[in-house]
Image (tube, helix red, strand yellow):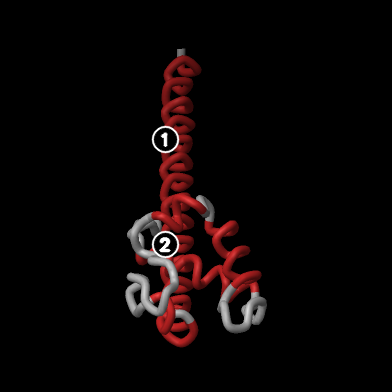
């Protein structure tokens, strides 16, 4: 009879452990996403600084177009280049127009993320 009484206690402990592990997994997944979002936001800020140094003369300080260059904040650029990597690849090979190809791949990604920020297309927490 004592064996029967211990079995429900054992299953309760197992169930509690499983619930704790699932909760921990969920928390860790949330934290990883939070860190990825922060890294993306930080890269976009670097892109913002690059944009003002290299791109604002032609594209305008807010990406609203100036000097004959396309507007970058109206969603059209993101409609054409649907991923960060495709936009970054274009930037790296074609920009700046006065000296294409001088940007590193990281600079191109940072600029692409800033353009996404201009279009309110960065992930949030």
Find residue 75 and report its horizontal and vertical position in percent: 37, 55
Residue neighbourhood size for the residue with mark 2, other residues' Cα within 10 Å, grouped as few (<14), some (14–19), many (≥20): many
Q: Tell me the quadrant of the picture where the C terminus can be found.
A: bottom left
Q: Quadrant of residue 13?
A: top left
Relative vertical location of residue 2 with respect to residue 78 in this rendering, above or below: above
Q: Earlier in the sequence, mark 1 or mark 2?
A: 1
Identify the residue at image location x=45%, y=55%. 78
Q: Nearer the viewer, residue 34 or 5?
A: 34
Relative vertical location of residue 55 with respect to residue 113 in this rendering, above or below: below
Q: Residue furthest top?
A: 1
Q: Quadrant of residue 88?
A: bottom right
State the separation of the CA atoms marked 1 and 2: 43 Å
Identify the residue at image location x=48%, y=31%. 14
Q: Which tag is nearer the camera, tag 1 or tag 2?
A: 2
From the image, tell me which residue sits under label 2: 116
Q: Nearer the viewer, residue 122 or 70?
A: 70
Q: Secondary structure at mark 2?
A: helix
């Amino acid at each position: 009879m004592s064996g029967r009484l211990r079995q429900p206690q054992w299953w309760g402990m197992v169930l509690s452990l499983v619930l704790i592990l699932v909760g921990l997994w969920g928390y860790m997944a949330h934290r990883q996403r939070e860190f990825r979002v922060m890294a993306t936001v930080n890269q976009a800020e670097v892109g913002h600084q690059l944009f003002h140094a290299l791109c604002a003369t032609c594209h305008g300080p807010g990406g609203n177009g100036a000097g004959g260059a396309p507007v970058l904040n109206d969603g059209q650029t993101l409609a054409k280049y649907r991923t960060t990597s495709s936009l970054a690849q274009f930037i790296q090979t074609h920009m700046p127009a006065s000296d294409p190809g001088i940007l590193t791949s990281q600079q191109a990604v940072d600029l692409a993320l800033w353009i996404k920020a201009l279009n309110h297309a960065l992930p949030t927490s």
